Image (cartoon, coloured by chain):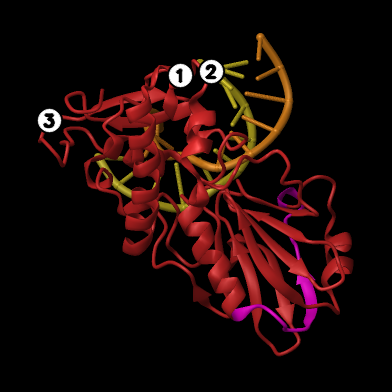
Chain colours: A red, B yellow, C orange
Amino acid sequence: MPELLEIEAYRRLFEDRALDRRIAEVEAPDAWYLKEGLGADALRDALVGGHFSAARRHGKLLLVDVAGRPTVGIRFGMTGRLIVDEHHALDRLEYGSNRPNPAWDRVVVRFEDGGDARVRDPRRLGGVILEPDTDRLGPDAASLSLRQVRALVEGSRAPVKAVLMDQARVAGLGNLLVDDALWRAAIDPARPARSLADDEVRALHRAVRTTLTTLGRRGGSHTGDLQPQRHDGGLCPTDGTPLRRRRIGGRTTYSCPRHQR
DNA sequence: GATGACCTGTGA
DNA sequence: TCACAGGTCATC
């Protein structure tokens, strides 16, 4: 599913290929996909005749600026993809369908030059918003400071995993990235956040950075060390211990009962 | 803060 | 045929 790393890949694709092209037409056949009262007509009015001037990202939210017009926000849910002129940002998407099916195109922006940018989302869990509000998102996980990690875990008795996945506290981390980061930090995902000692907070901060750079280099959230072991009988890549499977923060969680404490 | 609903393709 | 995947939101 798209987490911070995938959205960043979408952002780069958009920046590389969709900027400064005059928008001729907008198709939004799925009214469900337009959020917060936005209608197909309003989206069309906001875009047609303009051009995209920048692509930004905050957590898992992609923000595309339109020169002199309102910004468009795109959320990709867990199966959403961005396609520009038949170019995909990713080879495959974990848990998403990798079959091409134009019926899953929820929003298509056609450029005057004949190309287009489209959001393809089989499961319709994503959505497009006009002038999205980013105030309710925490700091972006890609530039998280040690001080911010300290503030994050301070005072919360929720499982540290739930805290890391709470987009209001820190934006961009999803189930897979969090499991991999906690595995790297050797911290049990179920630990109350505020029970972390200072050296564990440091380890967590380091682990989030390492996870993002390492998996980013490998090509996405699904390239984690834990990923091949996310199944019955999966083993810890460090010490070979059978992994534990639980539900924490409402999500399936894999962790090593031996070295994650 | 935890839980279930939303949505639907996939694989057993 | 059905459990399962999980980002987000409403509700408890």
- The relative height of residue A46 versus residue A233 in the rendered view (above or below) is below
Taking depth in this image into account, of A31 and A15 the one nearest to the observer is A15
The boundaries of the magenta stretch are A17-33
Q: Position of A247 compared to A46: left or right?
A: left
Residue A32 on the magenta span? yes
The answer as to whether the residues below labels 3 and 1 share one chain is yes
Cα–Cα gap, marks 1 and 2: 5 Å
Q: Disc 1, disc 2: CB below 8 Å?
A: yes
Badge 1 crowding class, 10 Å Cα cut-off, few under 14, some 14 to 19, many 20 or more, is some
Three-letter amino acid code of the residue under disc 1: Arg
Chain under disc 2: A
Q: In the rendered image, which quarter is residue A41 located in?
A: bottom right
Chain under disc 1: A
Give the labeled residue for mark 1. A194
Would you say residue A176 is visible in this rendering?
no
Question: Which comes sooner in the sequence, label 2 or label 3?
Answer: 2
Badge 2 crowding class, 10 Å Cα cut-off, few under 14, some 14 to 19, many 20 or more, is few
Residue A30 on the magenta span? yes
Q: Residue at x 85, y 46 (%)?
A: A37
Q: Report the disc number at residue A84.
A: none
Chain under disc 3: A
Give the labeled residue for mark 2. A155
Give the labeled residue for mark 3. A241
